[in-house]
Image (cartoon, rainbow, N blue to C red):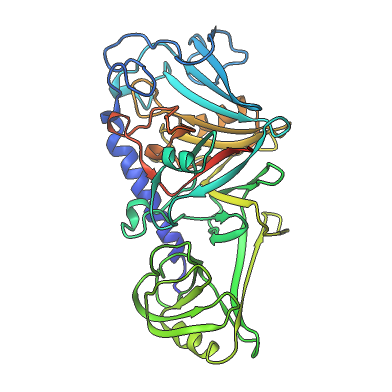
Amino acid sequence: MTPSARRGLAAAALLTVAATLTAVAPATAVPAGGPSTGLAGESGAPLPEATGFATPVSTTGPSGVLPLGDADLVETRASESLARGVTLTRIVRGTEPAPADQINTTPRGPWVVSVLTIDPRRARGHLQATYGADLARVEKTSELVRSAGAVAGVNASFFTFTANPTYPGEQVGLGLFDGKLLSEPLTDPAEANLLIDAKSNKVLTGHLSWTGAVRNRQTGAELPLEYINHPPASADDVVLFTPEFGAATPSGTGAEVVFDRRGCVVRTATTRGTTLTASQFAVQATGSDADTLLALTTRGCVDRRIALADQRGRKVQLHKGLYGVTGRYQLTSDGAVVVPPGSGSFFDRNPRTIAGTTRDSKIVLATIDGRQTTSVGTTMNETAAVAKSLGLHDSINLDGGGSTTMALADGTLVNHPSGTGGAERAVGDAVVFIPRH
């Protein structure tokens, strides 16, 4: 295959997001009395205290406050228990709406941060990742939370979005669901992964790598895989497709072989595009790899050889209850801020979604509203500083911008998305906490 094809798709998706971030910044100021937060907009009225929470406490000193903006800003915090061991905290820093032309520069804020904290030692339930009807389509975070029967959740992975309108929901990077690797991690070191063991509620962050191949059991011949559940990006691509991908596999020139659950050939085609049953999988190949695939599967059955490793090269054992999603940039590692320097709209102030763990293994999912006069958002450096101030020993930056959303069990939005009028964007997947009944 041509080098960097998959990274090119990732770049296209991120450029689309970056363009959106730049284009909508001045236009997303929230009208006075917005429905999700009740915050004032451009009227110049002060921001009221958080509603629907316990009585907030104002703090003006430098200790125990978010490291954002001027030191004299008033900060309020209010918390409520959503379930045993699950707490939602609302932080508002700054009292005056920002001028619309100063959202990206003002030291006066305001900032609105929603923090979901899960204590695995007390909580009755588990954290996991979830997606909608299939990987190719998108669903709103609120719907993913509600359909999963979750207490609450946030948007998760970066996804193709407008870079491929036919398959907008496919992850750009790791997608691991209940022990099945359904989207491979990128080689791009900027990718940061959140790995969740739902059985133990242990959460790890870092960068994973993978290898994949199909091997003929009879002849021993192997064909390496480029992707899992992604349309071929160039000539000489080999892609594994599972039933979770979508209603049909991508169509086009090349070859496609469909296998049953044992890895034995069901049918072979010299063009691509078919439907799969729940017990089948397919391998597509383009360019010269099409002939190689057809030759490898002429006789005998195949095994799928897929391996995942952590950033130290240690094998990650795939098992039921293991989930993983993809972010971009590690924010903190071992308690230190590690986000790299950068420039451009991606590093400017934007809405952000954060996931990580504290030193004592509490799990934190947080959203920072942005691109609004009622909450200006954070740069990548500011996002990392917020993560550290929230006590996150290890944390990553999940998809943000218009995707940033936190929702409750009934679909109610906790934060105020940056879409026009607070409109919620449909996304590829979400991380949710599901109670044990």
Residue 43 seen anywhere in this rendered image of the structure: yes
- Name the foreground residue: 250 vs 288: 250
Q: Nearer the viewer, residue 395 or 425?
A: 425
Numbered disc total: 0
Q: Quadrant of residue 222?
A: bottom right
Residue 50 in the figure: left or right of residue 385 = left
Instruction: Tell me where residue 208 sits by quadrant.
Output: bottom right
- Tell me which residue sits at (70%, 34%) in the image: 120
Residue 339 visible: no
Against 178, residue 203 (above or below) is above
Which residue appears farthest toward the front when viewing the image?
Answer: 437
Question: Height in image: 252 above or below 92?
Answer: below
| x then y, percent, for residue 218 | 65, 89
Residue 190 lies, with reference to residue 117, above or below; the image says below
Q: Residue at x 57, y 54 (%)?
A: 177
Image quarter where the C terminus lies is: top right
Vertical position of residue 177 compared to residue 154: above or below: below
Residue 300 placement (x, y as % from top left): 60, 89
Q: Return the x and y of residue 2 as percentages of the image width and height.
A: 44, 72
Q: Is residue 326 left or right of residue 34?
A: right
User: Looking at the image, which residue is at 43% across and 66% down?
Assistant: 5
Give the residue displayed 46% in from the left and 39% down from the top: 146
Where is residue 175 drawn, in percent x and y? 53, 55
Q: Nearer the viewer, residue 321 or 20?
A: 321
